[in-house]
Image: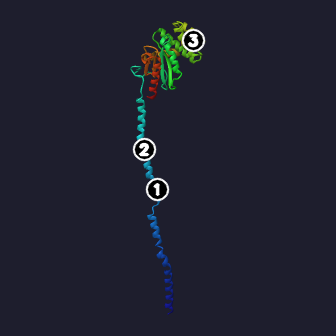
Amino acid sequence: MKRFSFLALVLSFALAACGGAEQPVVEAPVAPPAQEEAVVETPDPAAEVVDEAPEMVEESAAEEEDVQAVDQPIILAQAETSAASQEWKFTEGVHYARLVPTQPTVGGADKIEVAEVFWYGCGHCNDFEAFIDRWLETKPANVRFVRIPAIWNPLVKLHAQLYYTEEVLGNSGKIADKKAFRAAVFAEYHRRGNRLASVDAIQEVFEKHGVSAEDFNSTWNSFEVSQKLRVADDLARRYSITGVPAVVVNGKYRSGAAEAGGYPRLLELIDELIVKESIR
């Protein structure tokens, strides 16, 4: 009887314990499913942004590449069209001749070279002097101007040697005013009738402008002057110079006042050929 009572008592405690845990066990599973559904069914905006951002970046980059691929040829085409569609005032074969192949120049290729071939004894060269001097005051910065004396016969060669002696002494500071000296040489020939047909006559002109006999003689007979004369002779042949004043632009184009239609138009032609050489 006591054993039965003890077992009944244990059993009643066990049932009471399971019954107390039963309420949370039944109700607890109800809440978790609701939370799981909220996680599954409710979209996460951050997750969508992260997933879609790479695609948006890739599409944007692709669109930018497409724009560049389309625009670049258009820009290049416009640049080419600008040079090709330029309206030129002067015509090759009429107002100027093209030298084929292009010939050497006095200076380097760092600038566009405009060369005037002249002779001190030429009246037209004397007349052209005032025009070219005015043009030099506003010539473009990318242009180098040089003078090349003609060398056709002994007298013309003598004047070419005069010019290069003048150039060397002027560059070394032995001639104070190079422009005034050049004008004086033209005046000697065309106004005073001094043909400057001898070395002595030429030396007198130099001495009038403060050049000593020693400086004159050492320069006149120098290797530098002799070398310049050889270059001038070679370039005159290459440029096919048959009359002066003649103008050669960058060793490529040759013209004169007769072809261009006068000195003012010759300067306009020079400017146009400089533009051609600048955009090529």
Q: Secondary structure at mark 3?
A: helix
Q: Nearer the viewer, residue 247 or 268?
A: 268
> Which residue bears the numbered disc 2?
65
Measured from the top left, where is residue 252 in percent x and y? 43, 22
Pick the front one: 164 or 124: 124
Neighbor class of circle 3 (other Cα within 10 Å; few <14, some 14-19, many 20+) is many
Q: Which residue is found at the position 51% from the left and 92% from the top?
A: 2
Q: Position of residue 55 (x, y in %)?
A: 43, 52
Q: What is the x, y in percent for residue 218?
A: 56, 12
Query: What's the amino acid at mark 2?
Result: Glu
Q: Residues within 10 Å of mark 2 (few under 14, many from 20)?
A: few
Which secondary structure lies at badge 1?
Answer: helix
Residue indicated by mark 1: 49
Q: Is residue 171 above or below residue 64?
A: above
Say which amino acid is labelled 3: Phe
Q: Position of residue 171 (x, y in %)?
A: 56, 18
Can you say which quadrant of the picture contains the C terminus? top left
